[in-house]
Amino acid sequence: MFRKTIVIGAAVLAMCGSAFTQSTNQPVPVNTLSDHQAFCDYVTQQAMAQRDLLLMPRATAGVTQPDTGLPMQMVWGISSSLSDVRKAGLTMDAARKDCDLYGATMAAQRNIQYALPVLEKQALQHRLALIQQASGKLDGLIAGTREMVDAQNLTRPMLFALQSSKIKLEADRADTQGKIAALYAPDLAATPLKQLVAEKQAGEAKEQSAIEKLNRQNNWDVSLSIGVHQQINPPSETPAPYGAVTVRYNLASGTINKHLSQATGAYTDWKSVQEGDVVRNAEILRKQVTDSISAQRNRLESLKAAQQQVQSNLLLVADTDTGAAIDFRNQLTSAQLLVEIEIGDASFRLTLLRDFLENNY
């Protein structure tokens, strides 16, 4: 009866291990993998290997000399551990938490890394539209001045002053287009940055909790060993079965668990101040945006003051039709167009930055 029990126990242990390994042999396609998916495949395969190692019973064989003076014996059998079975499930859970954390971290890091380039590209595209609008107005002014030059009402140097403004405008257009081409600004998730950071922090807490549970399994164990032994000299006719149940418990479990819990909290505190981490970088980005808002506000105030000066001078020559007055008016008008570009650019950037700060923090 005891031998029959051993055989049944061995079959059950073997089936438990094979049931978990058969479902893990399907290959994962490697084409069109995202960064997140590729990392998850990696950690999952690592966890599966560790899980299968923990779940499969261990086969043992050897020769032993009992301390009681009995003859030398040959021993073979299998053993399994309840703690290892528990660790197998916790290992897979830790891998899933690690995968989720990586995805949350990459999403937040991507939005932080490319936030300013995306805003800059939007601002530059808006500036191109302002340049196009000013260029059309300046072309009309140049055409009218050319007609007056042909009619000898104005001199060619007066026309050249407007053409010089056109050259500056085209140079500004080319420079803006070059900056847009040099910027890499991918499409970012619409999720607010504060939510992405919160999801990343929640993922860290879950991952550390899973690791803590896994480490706590080292404090105890219940192991089962079954097999047979046979006397070697003199040889016995039939092998004899054996079975053993071993219970192990670490007396320092309370202190160990306390330190593990404190380590989880300390990890969260460290990540909140770590240079280069998402939480710290999000605060740096907030500071950059806040400083940029202040800079654009000062720029806008200065530009508006310059615009008022131009408009005041335009009023002085609004009703004068002398050549000198027309020339001065043309110069003021072209200057006004250039100032309007800068004011429109500063206003758009200020609104863009304020909206970003409000929506993400």
Image: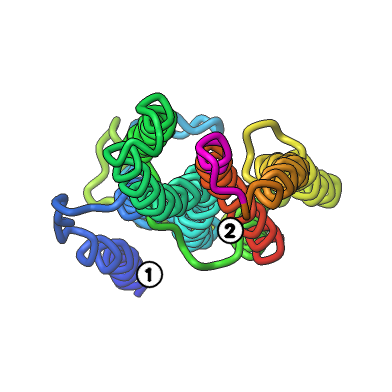
Q: How many marks?
A: 2
x and y percentages locating residue 104 in the rendered image: 52, 57
Look at the numbered disc 1 and give the secondary structure of its residue: helix
Q: In the rendered structure, does residue 347 fall within the stretch colored magenta?
A: no
Tell me residue 144's x, y (percent): 35, 49
Q: Classify mark 2: residues with Cα within 10 Å, few (<14), some (14-19) or many (20+).
A: some
Q: Tell whether label 1 touches label 2 (CB within 8 Å).
A: no
Outermost residue on the bottom side: it is: 1
Query: Residue 342 location in percent, x, y?
Result: 58, 44
The residue range painted magenta reads: 320-329
Between 217 and 223, the residue placed more toward the observer is 217
The disc placed on residue 222 is 2
In the image shown, does 28 or 305 lie closer to the viewer?
A: 305
Instruction: Measure how far apart labels 2 and 1 are at the Cα level.
Output: 21 Å
Residue at 22%, 48% (x, y): give it.
Answer: 237
Residue 325 part of the magenta-drawn span = yes
For label 2, the SS is strand
The reply, left or right, for residue 288 in relation to residue 94 is right
Which residue does the numbered mark 1 point to in the structure image? 2
Q: Amino acid at mark 2?
A: Val
The N terminus: image quadrant: bottom left
Camera-nearest label, 2 or 1: 2
Q: Is residue 223 left or right of residue 304?
A: left
